[in-house]
Amino acid sequence: MRLGFATLGCPGAPLDEVLALAQGNKFAGLELRAAPDEFTHTGLTAAERRELRTRIEDAGLEIFAVSSYVKLCAVEDQPLEAHLELAGDLGARGVRVFPGDDPADDTGTTEAPSAGEMRALDRVTTAPREVPILLETHDSHSTARQVAALCALLDTNVPGHNVKAIWDSSHTWSHGETLAESFALLKPWVDVVQFKQADSQQDYRPVAIDAGDFPIQELLQTLDGTDYPLSLEWELKWHPQLPSLAETLPAVHTWLGNGAVK
């Protein structure tokens, strides 16, 4: 498996620091958080995009995703096309989006799609299809069951769509699904697998690598024989009590076990 990390774990860090973290710790890929306070954002000029892509490629790294905050089901207009263009310019595998449906809506069934899911269908129908839209198991669709149902709805109603799934395995686990159940549900669409450490005794609070109980070996067994990019989503931006990536990345190799990744 190709191992990467999200720049959510080093908020505001310059590109040089991110590249050094990846290369120094034998990580092969990046999820680039796209936001005005990061070096990746939709306001980059064409020249800046070329330079960023070249620097990352020259470092031997792959961009697993441009991590946007687009909400596919939201009522408000969303900058999906701008992020798809950015990801295409950078050579990324796709654009990470959230479901972001109204909590009052009934979500996750093909029999009765919510108003938000119908908005998602409309957005996917009109979006450019050259770059994949990577829908994360998150917020209103935190389970694999819900994301799989939405993807199946897209398969039926938007033939040839460009939506795939980012499986946040810790998130679906925290919502009561086993890893094997989640993977079986998402397998037709999954493109990138995220993982992180969490403590189920503290309401699945993100914790240091050696302080939680996420069943990482179960995840590796579930993915045995596959070649999905495996990305550490270290949420230091939102949980500043976590150790830095400089401390965490070496510990990840030990946690995963020798030979688990390449």
Image (cartoon, rainbow, N blue to C red):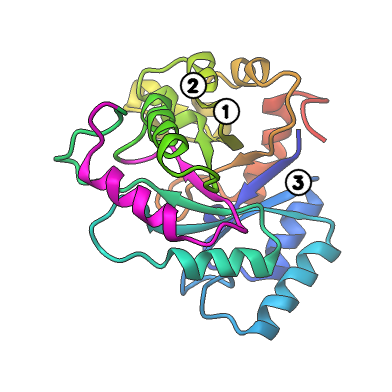
* Residue range (magenta): 111-139
Q: Amino acid at mark 2?
A: Leu
Determine the residue positioned at 36% across, 45% down. Answer: 99
Mark in front: 1 vs 2: 1
Spatial separation of the CA atoms under disc 3 and disc 2: 28 Å
Neighbour class for label 1 at 10 Å: few (<14), some, many (≥20)? Answer: few
Mark in front: 3 vs 1: 1
Determine the residue positioned at 60% across, 22% down. Answer: 216
Residue linked to disc 2: 185
Residue 38 against residue 196 in the figure, above or below: below
Q: Amino acid at mark 3?
A: Phe
Of 248 and 178, the residue lying toward us = 178
Of 36 and 197, the residue lying toward us = 36
Mark 1 or mark 3, which is nearer the start of the sequence? 3
Query: Secondary structure under badge 2?
Result: helix
Spatial separation of the CA atoms under disc 3 and disc 1: 26 Å
Residue linked to disc 3: 27
Asked whether, in this view, residue 158 is left or right of residue 225, the answer is left
| Residue 113 on the magenta segment | yes
Residue 218 against residue 51 in the figure, above or below: above
The answer to whether the residues at label 3 and label 1 have Cβ atoms under 8 Å apart is: no
Q: Amino acid at mark 1?
A: Pro
| Residue 132 on the magenta segment | yes
Residue linked to disc 1: 188
Neighbour class for label 3 at 10 Å: few (<14), some, many (≥20)? Answer: many
Where residue 85 appears, as percent x and y from the top left, is 57, 69
